[in-house]
Image: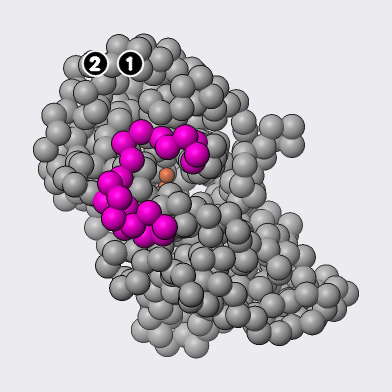
Amino acid sequence: MSDVVNDTKIPNNVDLSSDKKLQRALEAWQPNFINWWLEMGPEGFQQDQVWLRTAISVDSDGWAHFDYVKMPDYRWGIFLADKVPDRKIHFGDNIGQPVWNEVPGEHRNTLRRLIVTQGDTEPASVEQQRLLGQTCPSLYDLRNLFQVNVEEGRHLWAMVYLLHSYFGRDGREEAEALLQRRSGDPDKPRILGAFNAPCENWLSFFMFTYFTDRDGKYQLLALAESGFDPLSRTTRFMLTEEAHHMFVGESGVQRIIERTAQLMKQAGMSEDVRKLGGIDLPTIQKYLNLWYTLSLDLFGGEVSSNAASFFAAGLKGRAFEEKNYTEHTALNQSYTLDKYEAGKLSREEIALRNAMNEVLRDNYVEDSQRGLDKWNRVLEKEGIDFRFKLPSRRFHRHIGMWADVPVTPAGEIISREEFEKRKSEWLPTAEDEAYVKSLMTTPVYEKGKMANWIAPPARGIKGQPVDYEYVRHNV
Ligand SMILES: [Fe+2]
Ligand SMILES: [Fe+2]
């Protein structure tokens, strides 16, 4: 177990004090990060005591230390998973060679781009979620929101550590730029589409943490395989935190569905629960369609020579490359996919390496389905015959060969005109958004109380009761 140093400005297990130059550079970045946090982090709660989990080391009891803390005082630290002795590159063209502990010159730009792209999503999501505290359904949910936010802040630290340590001046410039871009700002947007989309109500927040954080999980799994060992070690530890974000999403959506089912019964099994202040199932399906498809785009184009070269070089592997695959060069193998070109649909066989985005997207789609199965079991138990469905991966895409092709959620190609006419059945309308927001105008800050549109969680956090004072909020 690597030693953890907690008494310095920056908690870390990377022996930061032995590299004075790096330490100074990160200590100079730290106040800029705090300024960014105060400006773009959760608005209206910076002075509150929040019952948060802080990572103080990477071992099983150290990474989840719970206590009250004011968010600006959160100890954002640098934690890498322990080194695996004699680790070798285990996929692509360099199989069997020792992993890199320094950035290989020929892959410098590519690696920097991969790290910056991952790093950019972390502060972006904090920005997207910064006003949600003001409409929270309970103190329990408020605390979970802030837990996700501070950990995304820590993930930014994780990527900035790599930029500062291994990329010299360019890295320091990129680290600054990560604090300059702003989600949704047309002049200086975040890099990826879904991270510029507004996330302004709690149904969106739960769908975001279920679907968009799950993209994060798969990107991190692919980077955890990397032959650039510091990237692998950083992302391996980030994955432990990511699991909680997806739990927040999955259980949040489930609690909305539970409450909707109760209200449907009250309404005599009518689907129209809006008159009782609930969120009707078709509206939940529309938000699911929106965030799932925005997240599908994050995997990139179906056919990608970049993805092939990341794999060839050993920079980015497949999820669970070692565990799930027996052959690791991915050479002389093919992948068959639908091809849509000039209005014609066909099947095409492409080289497997060129299909790496699609391979990762396959894993993601399969994993996404599991939450829906759970949500549908709630409906089944309640005797409701509605079922949630993942839309076709052709639907509502902005990246890849299906970008802007008019397709139904069932995957059927239709005319642009019909798509425009029926869009309001499939994606949230301005009216849906206004309705969902109207439910959340009054935040719930009373211990143990829940907003009307969501059921309480089955249990509290880390053995605490549901009515625990998770956030000491002074109204
Ligand atoms: Fe993250
Ligand atoms: Fe996350």
Q: For the C terminus, give its image quadrant.
A: top left
Q: Is residue 418 left or right of residue 363?
A: right
| Residue at the (51%, 19%) spot, across then down | 169
Q: Residues within 10 Å of mark 1 (few under 14, many from 20)?
A: some
For the residue marked with disc 1, what is the amino acid? Gln
| Residue at the (61%, 61%) spot, across then down | 304
Q: Residues within 10 Å of mark 2 (few under 14, many from 20)?
A: some
Q: For the N terminus, give its image quadrant.
A: top left
For the residue marked with disc 2, what is the amino acid? Ser
Of 319 and 69, nearer the camera is: 319
Magenta region's main secondary structure? loop
Q: Provide residue 328's location: percent of width, then percent of height.
A: 36, 66
**Residue 89: within the magenta?**
yes
Residue numbers of the magenta segment: 88-108
| Residue at the (54%, 37%) spot, across then down | 109
Q: Residue 99's image quarter? A: top left
Q: Which residue is mark 1?
A: 23
Q: Quadrant of ligand 1?
A: top left
Q: Which residue is mark 2?
A: 17
